[in-house]
Amino acid sequence: MHEIIPDFAYLLGAIKDGSISVPSSGKCEITLAADFYKNWLTDVIVPKAVKVFGIPETKIKLYSVKSHKSKIEFYRAKIYSKSIHEVLSKFYTPGNQRMWSTPSIIKRSPLHIQIEYVKGFYDADGGCRDVNKFLQGKTKSINCEAGIACVFKGEINEPLVFIKTLFQRFDINSFIRKTNNQLMITGKQNVLKLYQNFTPLNSRKRLMLEDLLRYYF
């Protein structure tokens, strides 16, 4: 379980939008991932966690809450396990996820492992312009751009710098916004390379990228 296999790398990326709580009253709570799209959790996150941690599917609980902004259900995949909490705590310090840098073992890993990590990161915290909303008149403009968000407590947003540097190996040009919490990929060639090399497993986000690229190509 300590070996960094592709599925584990993906989960380490996806949990950037999850949480590893500070244990309280003997309770070790982990949110593996969270999303408005339940199928990403049931079809991707849960099977990978079952494989990586060697646990039954019933060990992973799905909870939903209503978003205050959109009133749409928001889903979380949670595990309550001391042993799994101990494993994940070797990569991220429990508590404030704004302190989480890229795990050093990911940085030392082969390229295909780093790709899986970023795919998990994008599936959790990435997105692109919604061309369908534009075509339906719900938004007034459309640009060929995608982005990955990450709030990091530091002068340099290390997680986004790591991803930006990895993108350069694929000739994907990107930049970090001045607000320092979003990595932007703009222009149809860069977005196309993002899709080709880091194809999302979150089908909602994959289809959004495909629709955007179809509009521009």
Image (spheres, helix red, strand yellow):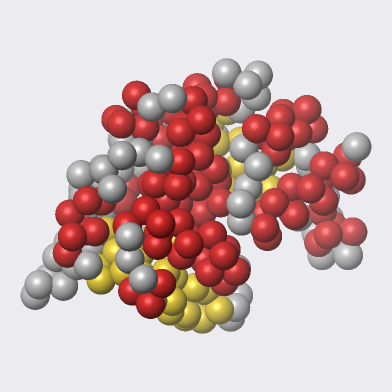
On the image, the x and y values in percent for residue 194 come to 67, 34
On the image, the x and y values in percent for residue 168 come to 58, 19
Residue at 51 percent across and 54 percent down: it is 124
Residue at 78 percent across and 39 percent down: it is 144
On the image, the x and y values in percent for residue 121 come to 49, 45
On the image, the x and y values in percent for residue 116 come to 50, 39
Can residue 144 be seen here? The reply is: yes
**As drawn, 145 above or below 176:** below
**As drawn, 52 above or below 168:** below
> Which image quarter holds the C terminus?
top right
In this rendering, would 148 be left or right of 27?
A: right
The residue closer to the viewer here, 71 or 32, is: 32
In this rendering, would 80 be left or right of 203?
A: left
In this rendering, would 86 be left or right of 2?
A: left
Residue at 25 percent across and 71 percent down: it is 80
Number of numbered discs overlaid on the protein picture:
0
Residue at 65 percent across and 42 percent down: it is 199
In this rendering, would 175 be left or right of 26?
A: right
Q: Quadrant of residue 86?
A: bottom left
Can residue 60 be seen here? The reply is: no
The residue closer to the viewer here, 217 or 68, is: 217
The residue closer to the viewer here, 183 or 209, is: 209
